[in-house]
């Protein structure tokens, strides 16, 4: 070694790697101080307004209009007026507008993703990699059907229903908007949509996209507000209600419109069983469990909130799950390295806290991701309960938060029995390397979506919807067009 | 506890624990997870930290028929002092050469702390009788190699003769004496992630101090999902026995960005304990200069031309 080489650094290897903050810039989002209602292609001023905040720090983002009964009625009237020309427009022309919307969404995806995370609290990596690509994909997919309805439903002479009233939740604001609007437009309907009270901003920004795409006025109308606005929309002269949200509100809607002739599809709550067999690929299964319940802070109606583990593999699964949970990065939704973001609202946080308290009192054992939660905003650490009995509230009620309940089973029959023993039936997961068992389970599980060796995977071509108290009707795929069409072969309804 | 009679020596873990733990790998899901880890955004201080660590973990490698003492001596200087303009840039972990060049490397690196690794066991094919392979190792050790990078017998592995693979590793480990043993699985020839996992467990059970992905002689060498599968096997062995086995991806890691992705995967799979050259190495030749270039960019704010970094 030479003299020069001897002067080389010989310091010990440093320890402790902490990722520097990697915040996504919010400059791309230009918010107005106050938003009106988007009716008939114009921004109308509402009489009352409310403030929408960011759940990451409770800071106000903008003032949003509270649509009154009269506002909703004028939105429905605008949609009714637009229906005449929109429904008779050639399918290929409707498709052009929809392709345009899809392209603009894709082009402006960063802006939308940042706003979605700001207003809703979900991690930017999810808005960026899941919500936005899927939202654009839904418009692309349904645009393709717009001029092929006759082929989609041969010999049934499909025709649009009229005006669709759509009420969407706060967990995937823009994605649920596209799940609702895309099939409605492809089928030739016009739309009045009410975004969730806590997350209206991406829907309002979407109005810019509609203008940019030069969609004819009145084809899509967006009215913001709280439950009163939703009730007004249900009560109005729409031909169909499509609702995604809680089972409680879904039931109220169904009761309310019974006998009116209005069509209804409901996509409600869930308490999905994620079933792990002892021959699963265990490390990938752990990822699937984590993705199943901590994706979007567990604010997912199809979340895998009940983990059913075969007893013979219970210990390694729980050990590995806890170890993996300890690596979850909880914090600022706008940090690109955040895995779990903020809880959407104070109300939701209180609901989660109440059920977690109930779980503790019932005797379940709790483990949480060790993490420092920010002081401002709404936060809940990823949580798993072990020693859970089927009769506990945390195993029965939908928590809609990052809380997993672990139960065990011994045989496939018992797994099916436990999985189906719930008022819900939206989704289920099966983890096994054995293909025949996947099919055996899928035949017996009463759930609308069954994932095998994956979870929370969505595609516009694949139908989604529930059994029992999880609702009825399907969204996505060909099935998703049907609720927006009337057929000559039918003797009832629209 | 019940013992399985037909299992090779050293692999007699209790049956109940072993059955589920050899396990299987879901290709789609493991690739998805590796892809997620690769998306971590590593900036500023965290980036400099990672770049310096990656450098400290490098096994600077030359494995060519045309290698000469002159070439290896030059590489040794580079290994000790990767950036001649900045003595604060740390040395690499080791240089990796063919056995014949071990004495040259040993001499040039004396006192530097940089280790000498020698490939061995009829590298890269491993298609030779066991006694030849063992002699190969003994020679390399006698010439001063601190570390031995052996190849497994893929022919035996793929025909299901796991015991032969296992026994060979045991014999090579004995021949290593104090030298550290890295076991090259040559994943490109194993074909499936299930095989990568099995081979990892066989190599660790037989006494390998490190498991290594590739010889670097084939396309499709180290990948992020392959490393993830191997890391998970290492984690399982650690959790069951408390023994820490090292990891070395080799082949195909050419950019600093890619190297940071490998480190993130280690960090979030095995934890910070493995972020040290004692337990993590990257086999590479062209990577070092890209790291140097990125380090200088972090310090000066500007990229410099490749001509400002020595090739060896």
Image (cartoon, coloured by chain):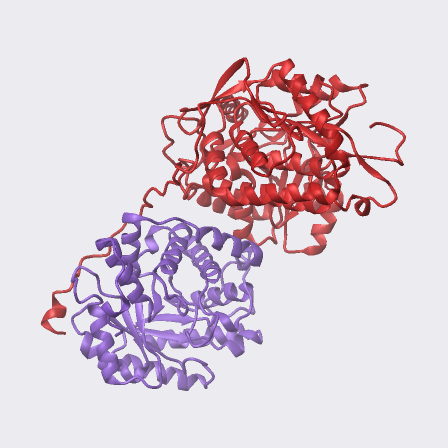
Chain colours: A red, B purple
Which residue is located at x 49 percent, y 64 percent? B12
B31 is higher (above) or lower (below) than B92? above
Left or right? Give the position of A364 relative to A466. Answer: left
Among all residues in the image, which is located at the extreme left?
Answer: A3
Q: Nearer the viewer, residue A156 or A433?
A: A156
- Residue B36 placed where, x, y %? 47, 50
The residue shown at (53%, 77%) is B156
- Residue A481 appears anywhere in the view: yes
Q: Quadrant of the C terminus of chain B?
A: bottom left
Q: Nearer the viewer, residue B123 or A121?
A: A121
Indicate the quadrant where residue A471 lies. top right
Residue shown at 38%/61% (left/top)? B245
Q: Is residue B195 left or right of residue A435?
A: left
> Left or right of B30: which side holds B265?
left
Q: Position of residue A148 (x, y in %)?
A: 77, 46
Please identify the quarter of the rendering in which residue B38 is found.
bottom left
């Amino acid at each position: 070694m030479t003299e020069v080489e001897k002067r080389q650094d010989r310091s010990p290897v440093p320890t402790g790697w902490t990722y520097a903050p990697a915040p996504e810039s919010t400059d791309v989002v230009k918010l107005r101080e106050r938003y009106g209602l988007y009716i008939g292609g114009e921004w109308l001023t509402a009489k009352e307004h409310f403030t929408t905040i960011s759940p990451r720090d409770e800071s106000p983002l903008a003032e949003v209009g509270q649509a009154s009964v009269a506002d909703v009625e004028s939105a429905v009237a605008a949609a009714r007026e637009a229906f005449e020309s929109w429904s008779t427009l050639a399918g290929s022309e409707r498709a052009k507008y929809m392709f345009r919307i899809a392209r603009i969404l894709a082009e402006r995806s960063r802006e939308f993703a940042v706003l979605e995370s700001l207003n809703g609290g979900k991690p930017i990596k999810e808005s960026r990699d899941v919500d936005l690509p899927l939202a654009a994909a839904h418009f692309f997919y349904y645009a393709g059907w717009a001029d092929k309805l006759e082929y989609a439903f041969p010999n049934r002479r499909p025709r649009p229903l009229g005006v669709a009233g759509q009420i969407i939740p706060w967990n995937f604001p823009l994605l649920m908007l596209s799940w609702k609007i895309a099939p409605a437009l492809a089928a030739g309907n016009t739309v009045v949509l009410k975004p969730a009270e806590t997350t209206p901003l991406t829907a309002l920004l979407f109005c810019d996209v509609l203008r940019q795409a030069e969609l004819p006025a009145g084809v899509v109308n967006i009215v913001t507000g709280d439950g009163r606005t939703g009730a007004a929309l249900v009560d109005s002269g729409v031909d169909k209600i499509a609702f995604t949200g809680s089972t409680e509100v879904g039931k109220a809607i169904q009761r309310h419109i019974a006998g009116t002739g209005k069509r209804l599809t409901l996509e409600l709550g869930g308490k999905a069983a994620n079933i792990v067999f002892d021959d699963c690929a265990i490390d990938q299964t752990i990822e699937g469990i984590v993705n199943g319940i901590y994706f979007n802070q567990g604010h997912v109606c199809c979340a895998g909130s009940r983990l059913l583990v075969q007893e013979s593999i219970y210990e390694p699964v729980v050990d590995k799950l806890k170890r993996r949970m300890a690596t979850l990065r909880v914090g600022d939704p706008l940090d690109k390295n955040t895995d779990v973001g903020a809880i959407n609202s104070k109300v939701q946080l209180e609901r989660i806290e109440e059920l977690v308290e109930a779980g503790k009192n019932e005797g379940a054992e709790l483990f949480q991701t060790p993490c420092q939660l920010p002081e401002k905003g709404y936060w809940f650490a990823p949580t798993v309960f072990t020693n859970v009995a089927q009769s506990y509230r945390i195993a029965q009620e939908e928590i809609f938060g990052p809380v997993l309940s672990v139960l065990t089973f011994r045989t496939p029959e018992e797994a099916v029995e436990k999985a189906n023993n719930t008022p819900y039936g939206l989704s289920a997961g099966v983890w096994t390397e054995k293909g025949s068992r996947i099919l055996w389970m899928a035949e017996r599980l009463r759930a609308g979506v069954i994932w095998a060796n994956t979870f929370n995977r969505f595609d516009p071509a694949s139908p989604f919807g529930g059994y029992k108290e999880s609702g009825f009707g399907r969204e996505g795929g060909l099935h998703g067009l049907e609720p927006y069409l009337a057929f000559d072969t039918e003797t009832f309804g629209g | 506890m019940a013992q399985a009679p037909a299992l090779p020596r050293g692999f007699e873990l209790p049956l109940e624990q072993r059955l589920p733990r050899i396990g299987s790998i879901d290709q789609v899901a493991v690739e998805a997870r590796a892809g997620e880890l690769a998306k971590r955004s590593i900036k500023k201080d965290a980036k400099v930290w990672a770049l310096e660590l990656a450098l400290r973990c490098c096994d600077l490698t030359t494995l060519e028929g045309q290698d000469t003492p002159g070439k290896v001596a030059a590489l040794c200087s580079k290994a000790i002092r990767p950036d001649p303009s900045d003595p604060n840039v740390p040395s690499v972990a080791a240089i990796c050469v063919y056995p014949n060049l071990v004495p040259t490397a040993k001499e040039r690196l004396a006192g530097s702390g940089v280790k000498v690794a020698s490939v061995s066991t009829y590298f890269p094919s491993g298609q030779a009788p066991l006694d030849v392979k063992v002699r190969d190792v003994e020679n390399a050790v006698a010439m001063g190699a601190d570390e031995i990078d052996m190849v497994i017998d893929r022919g035996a592995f793929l025909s299901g003769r796991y015991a032969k693979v296992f026994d060979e590793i045991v014999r090579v480990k004995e021949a290593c004496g104090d030298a550290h043993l890295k076991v090259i699985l040559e994943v490109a020839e194993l074909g499936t992630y299930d095989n990568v996992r099995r081979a990892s467990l066989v190599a660790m059970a037989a006494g390998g101090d490190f498991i290594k992905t590739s010889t670097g002689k084939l396309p499709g060498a180290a990948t992020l999902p392959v490393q993830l599968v191997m890391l998970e096997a290492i984690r399982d062995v650690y959790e069951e026995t408390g023994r820490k086995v090292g990891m070395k991806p080799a082949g195909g890691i050419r950019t600093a960005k890619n190297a940071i992705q490998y480190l993130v995967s280690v960090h979030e799979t095995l934890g910070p304990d493995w972020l040290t050259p004692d337990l993590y190495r990257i086999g590479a030749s062209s990577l070092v200069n890209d790291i140097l270039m990125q380090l200088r960019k972090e310090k000066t704010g500007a990229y410099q031309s490749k001509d400002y970094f020595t090739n060896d």
